[in-house]
Image (spheres, rainbow, N blue to C red):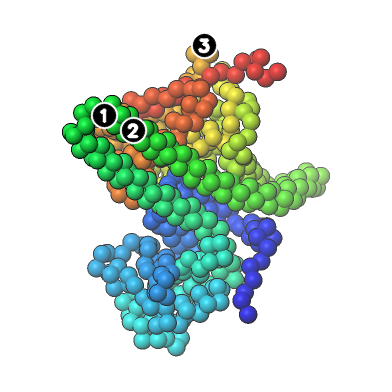
Amino acid sequence: MKPTNPNPASVLNNFAESLSQRELSILMDISTHIATTLDYREVLQIISDGISELLKTDTATIYSLQEDQSIYLEVATPTMSTDFQETFRYAKVPEHPHIQQALKTRSPIIIEDTSNEPLSPQEKKVLELSDVKSLLFLPLVLENELFGILIMGAQTEIRKFTPHEIRVGEMVANHLSGAIQKTILHQNLKTYKDTLEDQVKKRTQELEKANMKLVNKNQLAAMQRDELEVALEQLKVAQTRMVQTEKMVSLGTLTAGVAHEIKNPLNFIHGSYLGLMRFFKEANIEDKDAWKMLDSIKLGIERSTAIVSVLNDFSRNQKAPFKNCNIHQIIDNCLLMLNRQFDRKGITLEKIYSPQSMETLANANKLHQLFINILLNACQSIPKEGIVKIETQTEKDWLKINISDTGVGIKKENLQQIIEPFFTTKDPGQGTGLGLSISYSIIEDHKGEMEFDSEENKGTTVRIKLPVTKKNQLL
């Protein structure tokens, strides 16, 4: 009998209620990184690294299922050497019974102790090379179709995966399959774009040859070429916005559901905290350790409430009408989401906020996306330890926001190209060149301005101007 999928809303509700603050923080980290790229292999690597951190495993690999019932190694955590990757690159599913069973049943399969488990010759060969003691196989499903399999491994000791860990891994893998689907769509669209570019090039060459024979038709040929180039550019921009919008809607749905389900138990915890505090005061309890623990509970509630608030802001409708937005609050929300990335690199954050009102009419979700892109670029430009400074001020009818970093900077010849779609200075597989292009579109939608100052090996400053909210706009 073919297994049936449970109701998605019910599964998401139960899943959200079981998450710890550490697990929620890691999930936010994964979602933030995925939101900044459309590169297929980079998204898979983010998922592999993130789930490995989430479940505290030594290894993680993602294989895609091929049409000939073989599997192909896409990414691994930690990253394998080229020679080692070739050993594991392809595998025939029938030669790996545990993988075959996980794909057939679409359910997790566990090997608690590989030394006591009956294994096929090919499975033994792989284990001899990888020295894995325990394994967890999680099938990946895209729109009710098998996409591949995620394999988690423990090398240092025999690992007994708990039901909660298995459920978290399975649910996260299934929910993040949507992000994989969007990158596959982007990859297909980019292939289509490249094909169109080849067609434009071929057509241009044909026109140039015709021009040599038909001088009197030069003007017509030039017009046709220009029309094709304009059409291609418009298609590139439309594709970029369509894919990004679809992905943000998918992430927004997930984060909104998680935030909603966390809020309810958080209210119960807050009510219990207030009751305990009232009891302590009425009973004249003066135990300092008890009061410290009560303060720790309050701090945890405030931290979790802030995270829920950020999730709600990040998941709002992309097409929502403009409303009055506080720039300082939006930037602080983005910094909360990127806090882990800044801490990992030892980056010092300096905020010099204007004491005056910093409010503008805007789509709050898009402004969150704008500042996350810029702040994440600043973070990624700093190899290790540095400073990111945020300064705000008002000037007549404008709000001015300057975000500077002490990173590697941008070459002078690249400054004029950085907002063009698909232009990137990062290594292959590290970025798609969409972040600043989308950010510039957001600025244009809000009738603002964005400029860049950069010096190689010294850092970059992004200067943003947004119109001040006027009283008559609020009527």
Answer whether residue 58 is visible to the viewer in this image.
no
Which one is nearer the viewer's eye here, 408 or 227?
227
Q: Seen in the image, is 438 located left or right of residue 425?
A: right
The span from disc 2 to disc 1 (Cα, nearest Å) is 11 Å
Q: Quadrant of residue 97?
A: bottom left
Q: CA distance from mark 1 to mark 3?
A: 54 Å
Residue 396, label in figure: 3
Q: Identify the element where label 3 is drawn.
A: loop
Which residue is painted at 36% across and 26% down in the image?
452
Q: Which mark is residue 122?
A: none
Rendering coords of residue 17 (x, y %): 66, 57
- Image quadrant where one finds the N terminus: bottom right
Q: Which residue is mark 1?
A: 217
Specify the amino acid type for callout 2: Gln
Return the residue nearer the eye: 273 or 91. 91
Compare marks 1 and 3 and give the one earlier in the sequence. 1
